[in-house]
Image (cartoon, grey):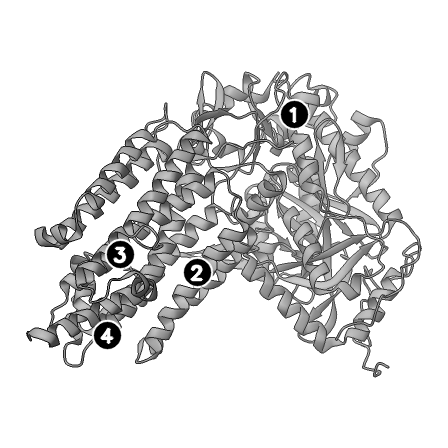
């Protein structure tokens, strides 16, 4: 006979954030890689400063008094432990969450994260140079993927697993909107006609590769596809693991599961928000979204995801009666 | 065929100390000789390589404690020495009975001083030692605890003198730590040195968590069928956090921090995703002072406001009970043999180290006149801090100790230097004798159970007598032989 254990609200919160931070690490590595790919001779600074903008890091970057050179941006995201959006800072936060979760997560999860963390905390400057950068990004992605695989194979699937999934799916949806947005910020050569089209498609190809969706897209894309087909794929395809629509579908399933299987109250507001998000995303053709302004749309999606995460936090992580003063000192960004 | 290689024990010289491996003892079934021979066959170089791999494992697994210096927090492993320490079945029988006897006396003493106070009334122990003790808790007076158990988890620090006799150095009746290393060291040993362990008839150590959980369930408030047990930790910044993780996992109970709990209507609840859930037993790894800011330190953020109230109402059990620190005080320690006789009408199975109590004129005079020969210890400290070892101290250090002693005699006790036993330990210079102690762990709910063996801590520096992890000590696997039967044969060759 087994007994169902209640899940501490703090554990749920730590699981949610551990997953988010790790997903963020992987996506940041993808973003750096795609930026490197877009970097064209003579225009490096433009590509790299776009990365700052899509992460909304203008202020943090400016505070350091740095010129947006390729080198400075790379250091900002790969070496600067004090930048809260850097890969080392995210991994540090993930590990801190994991440390408080050690009673719950598998030893294998902890050990891998511990070793991975040590490597990332000590990335040498030379790894940022030339072809080494993309290999470094590859290793970081692989570190998170290893974590994901170990988690899939070893982490007990009670409600804790559901909160873990919620965190990574919300982060993943958010990151995919940022990846799509990166293209918006990039300047296309002021050329015209066929050259422009080719340049554009090359760049979208890079985005697709960064999202690990290039080949899948080729399989489902119509011949003579256009950039809006790529946007549609990344945002609305419900078979592509990193699409916003698939993330939302899974989030909805998880919230339902928390309610039906684990009897948790307080899922309704979040479920309704997911419905609204999906409606906004799938309710009209992507062409019309693009026509109205893709950047603004993506911004809204990001805002809604923040509200969704906040709603989940209010329902399950905090504000437990009667201690409203419950001093949460969490490591969240 | 194996090459003959130099015997790593060839220049091992434990004299004049008792050696835990090489001093011959009856009833070890050839275990010590087998360990020596097998280490010889492995060879020093391979031994070092495997020891290094084992320590690397500990880092990766995060089996670490945290040392804080200034602003830095550094995760350190407890250095692991791969040469095991062996206790025969007969030796263990004495140790186990002795530890049980002491735990029984400690619990009876605590019950007595918080109730009838017979021991004080009959003049066995001075009143001021008990009631003037900062760890005496008036809140505990007339408060009943289940089975009369105050000290649910006890760590007894034991050393061995040059004649091989076991002596108790101190009792740890508050929140003794280190038991996780006992179990982890065994796992590490099995992984790294299966060839050293083959055929050894050892008592297992893995059931500590289950035993602990059973005790926690036993002490839960009367009438609770399926009690919710939790482990209360100060959190990830505590130096023993790994152990808290270990124990909560082994028990299968949540590791909670103060903010996860709250008290309402004198009951303790924990905040879960599904709302509040009742808590019935708390194994707390938090000092008395921090448990409840409404009763003890008001500035403590680690505890749970109202916890003591809920406890006094009998709605939650605490392990260990509040106020046990008065029993493991170094000054009260000196009276332990008398306490055992008084409460149990038995002779102590394990002796104390001879102890001079400086609050008493004779003790102070003796200590003052023999400072250079004695170990002087403050009564309130733990972790090996503030100790002066006379024969090792410079004249400056001795004067410093003398000044501290005379300024506040009641804060000090002194003991002769015990010639601590040694154990072969792998060092940079080869296998060398290093001083060692032993901390068995006793778990008490309704009855007392003692984990076979305990933590053997070694002083890694040559000649050092301080084995505490915070002072550079290491640890090793402690083998308790199940019986005196012969060691089984090696299956397969020793791996190099």
Q: Nearer the viewer, mark 4 or mark 2?
A: 2
Q: CA distance from mark 4 to mark 2?
A: 27 Å
Left or right of residue A333: residue A294: left
Residue B21 rendering spot, x and y as whole percentages: 82, 62
Task: Quickly name the residue at label 3.
Answer: A234
Q: Residues within 10 Å of mark 1 (few under 14, many from 20)?
A: many
Q: CA distance from mark 1 to mark 4?
A: 62 Å
Q: Nearer the viewer, residue B270 or A138?
A: A138
Vertical side of B186 occupied by B44: above or below: below
Query: Where is residue B412, by image quadrant?
Result: top right
Task: Quickly name the residue at label 1.
Answer: B219
Q: Residues within 10 Å of mark 2 (few under 14, many from 20)?
A: some
Q: On residue A145, which mark appears? A: 2
Q: Is residue A63 visible?
A: no
Q: Is residue B429 visible?
A: yes
Task: Quickly name the residue at label 4.
Answer: A71
Left or right of residue B421: residue B219: left
Q: CA distance from mark 2 to mark 3?
A: 20 Å
Vertical side of B347 occupied by A183: above or below: below
Q: CA distance from mark 4 to mark 3?
A: 29 Å
Residue B308 rendering spot, x and y as whole percentages: 51, 23
């Amino acid at each position: 006979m087994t007994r169902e254990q209640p899940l501490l609200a703090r554990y749920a919160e730590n699981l949610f954030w551990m997953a988010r931070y790790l997903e963020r690490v992987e996506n940041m590595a993808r973003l750096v890689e795609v930026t490197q790919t877009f970097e064209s001779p003579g225009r490096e600074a433009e590509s790299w400063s776009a990365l700052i903008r899509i992460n909304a890091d203008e202020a943090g970057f400016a505070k350091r008094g740095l010129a947006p050179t390729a080198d400075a941006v790379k250091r900002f995201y790969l070496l600067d432990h004090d930048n809260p959006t850097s890969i080392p800072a995210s991994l540090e936060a993930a590990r801190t969450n994991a440390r408080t979760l050690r009673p719950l997560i598998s030893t294998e999860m902890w050990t891998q994260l511990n070793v991975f963390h040590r490597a990332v905390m000590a990335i040498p400057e030379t790894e940022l140079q030339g072809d080494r950068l993309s290999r470094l990004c590859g290793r970081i992605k692989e570190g998170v993927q290893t974590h994901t695989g170990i988690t899939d194979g070893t982490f007990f699937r009670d409600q804790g697993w559901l909160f873990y999934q919620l965190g990574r799916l919300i982060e993943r949806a958010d990151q995919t909107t940022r990846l799509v947005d990166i293209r918006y910020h990039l300047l296309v050569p002021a050329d015209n006609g066929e050259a422009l089209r080719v340049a554009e498609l090359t760049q979208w190809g890079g985005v697709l590769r960064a999202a690990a969706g290039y080949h899948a897209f080729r399989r489902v894309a119509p011949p003579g596809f256009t950039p809006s087909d790529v946007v549609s794929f990344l945002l609305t395809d419900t078979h592509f693991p990193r699409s916003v629509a698939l993330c939302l579908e899974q989030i909805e399933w998880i919230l339902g599961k928390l309610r039906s299987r684990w009897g948790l109250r307080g899922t309704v507001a979040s479920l309704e928000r997911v419905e609204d998000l999906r409606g906004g995303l799938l309710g009209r053709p992507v062409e019309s979204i693009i026509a109205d302004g893709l950047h603004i749309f993506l911004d809204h999606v990001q805002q809604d995801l923040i509200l969704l995460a906040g709603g989940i936090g209010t329902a399950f992580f905090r504000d437990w009666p009667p201690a409203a003063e419950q001093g949460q000192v969490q490591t969240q960004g | 065929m194996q090459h003959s290689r130099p015997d790593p024990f060839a220049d091992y010289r434990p004299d004049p100390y008792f050696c835990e491996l090489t001093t011959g003892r009856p009833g070890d079934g050839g275990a010590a000789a087998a360990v020596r021979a097998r280490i010889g066959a492995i060879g020093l170089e391979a031994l070092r390589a495997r020891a290094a791999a084992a320590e690397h494992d500990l880092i990766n697994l995060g089996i670490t404690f945290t040392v804080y210096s200034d602003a830095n927090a550094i995760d350190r492993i407890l250095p692991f020495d791969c040469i095991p320490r062996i206790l025969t079945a007969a030796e263990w029988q004495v140790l186990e009975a002795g530890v049980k006897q002491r735990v029984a006396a400690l619990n009876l003493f605590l019950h007595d001083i918080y109730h009838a106070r017979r021991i004080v009334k009959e003049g066995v122990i001075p009143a001021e030692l008990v009631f003037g003790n900062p760890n005496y808790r008036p809140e505990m007076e007339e408060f009943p605890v289940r089975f009369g158990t105050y000290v649910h988890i006890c760590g007894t620090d034991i050393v061995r003198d040059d004649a091989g006799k076991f002596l108790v150095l101190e009792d740890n009746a508050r929140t003794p730590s280190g038991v996780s290393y006992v179990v982890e060291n065994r796992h590490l040993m099995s992984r790294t040195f299966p060839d050293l362990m083959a055929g050894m008839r050892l008592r297992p150590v893995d059931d500590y968590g289950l035993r602990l959980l059973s005790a926690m369930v036993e002490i839960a408030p009367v009438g609770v069928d399926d009690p919710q047990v939790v482990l209360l930790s100060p959190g990830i910044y505590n130096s023993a956090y790994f152990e808290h993780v270990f124990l909560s996992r082994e028990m299968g109970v949540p590791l909670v921090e103060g903010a996860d709990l709250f008290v309402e209507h004198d009951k303790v609840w924990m905040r879960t995703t599904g709302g509040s859930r009742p808590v019935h037993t708390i194994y707390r790894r938090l000092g008395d002072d921090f448990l409840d800011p409404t009763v003890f330190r008001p500035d403590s953020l680690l505890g749970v406001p109202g916890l003591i109230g809920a406890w006094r109402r009998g709605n939650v059990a605490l392990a260990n009970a509040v106020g046990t620190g008065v029993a493991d005080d170094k000054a009260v320690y000196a009276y332990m043999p008398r306490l055992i006789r008084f409460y149990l009408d038995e002779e102590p199975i394990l002796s104390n180290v001879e102890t001079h109590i400086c609050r008493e004129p004779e003790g102070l005079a003796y200590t003052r006149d023999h400072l250079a020969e004695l170990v002087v210890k403050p009564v309130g400290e733990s972790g090996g801090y503030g100790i002066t070892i006379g024969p090792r101290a410079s004249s400056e250090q001795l004067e410093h100790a003398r000044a501290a002693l005379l300024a506040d005699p009641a804060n000090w006790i002194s003991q002769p230097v015990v010639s601590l036993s040694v154990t072969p330990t792998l060092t940079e210079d080869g296998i060398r004798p290093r001083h060692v102690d032993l901390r068995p762990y006793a778990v008490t709910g309704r009855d007392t159970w003692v984990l076979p063996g305990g933590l053997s801590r070694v002083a890694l520096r040559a000649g050092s007598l301080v084995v505490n992890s915070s002072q550079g000590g290491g640890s090793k696997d402690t083998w308790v032989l199940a019986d005196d039967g012969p060691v089984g044969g090696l299956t397969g060759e020793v791996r190099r």
